[in-house]
Amino acid sequence: SNVDLYVFGETIRDYVALLGSLRETFNQRVKNYGVWTNAQKTLQSKRDSEAKMQTTGKTDKLPIVQAEIKDWEQKEKDAEKAFNKCSKVLKREVERFETVRTKEFKAKFLEHLEALMHMQEELIRLWEGYLPDVQAIEAES
């Protein structure tokens, strides 16, 4: 029936919307990972510059580089926190998808199949009801 098809369609629409949400969260996680690795590389570069300045004795710009290192250490920590937070959200969303939506989708799909089966049974019953009439018409001919 149309109602069953509508309910099943709504379940599929919700299913697709949740998959879209998962995809957006995953894309954000990828971006956060890129920011984090970039911060790690920049921090390492600043530390290398500091070490080079100390070994060559050029300490005139050392306070500036040390301040930049401190700044990039904080940026790296913040980026790591953002990545880890996004990872937790993604994991939670995937778990929710796997448990709730999969069960719900399966239940709605089974309900839809059962409704189709009942419609088929009703159709068979109706045709079986017409069979004696058809046989009577054939016998008269």
Image (cartoon, rainbow, N blue to C red):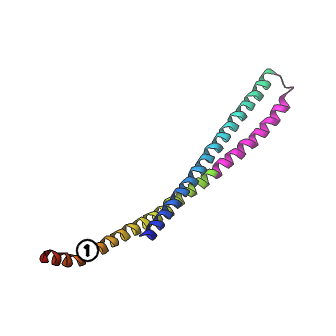
Q: Is residue 64 left or right of residue 4?
A: right
Q: Nearer the viewer, residue 55 or 86?
A: 86
Does residue 139 belong to the magenta stretch? no
Q: Which residues are magenta?
A: 57-85
- Quarter holding residue 49: top right
- Residue 45 lies, in percent from the top left, at 72, 30
Give, as a three-letter code, the residue at label 1: Trp
Nearer the observer, 69 or 134: 134
Residue position marked by numbered label 1 in the rendering: 127
Q: Is residue 13 left or right of residue 30?
A: left
Q: Position of residue 8 (x, y in %)?
A: 46, 65
Which SS type dominates the magenta stretch?
Answer: helix
Q: Is residue 40 above or below residue 137?
A: above
Q: Is residue 91 left or right of residue 129?
A: right
**How many numbered callouts?**
1
Query: What is the quadrant of the N terminus in the image?
Result: bottom left
Q: Is residue 78 magenta?
A: yes
Q: Which residue is pictured at 64% across the width and 40% down the height?
A: 34
Q: Position of residue 114 (x, y in %)?
A: 36, 70
Q: Quadrant of residue 43?
A: top right
Q: Which residue extends farthest front? A: 141
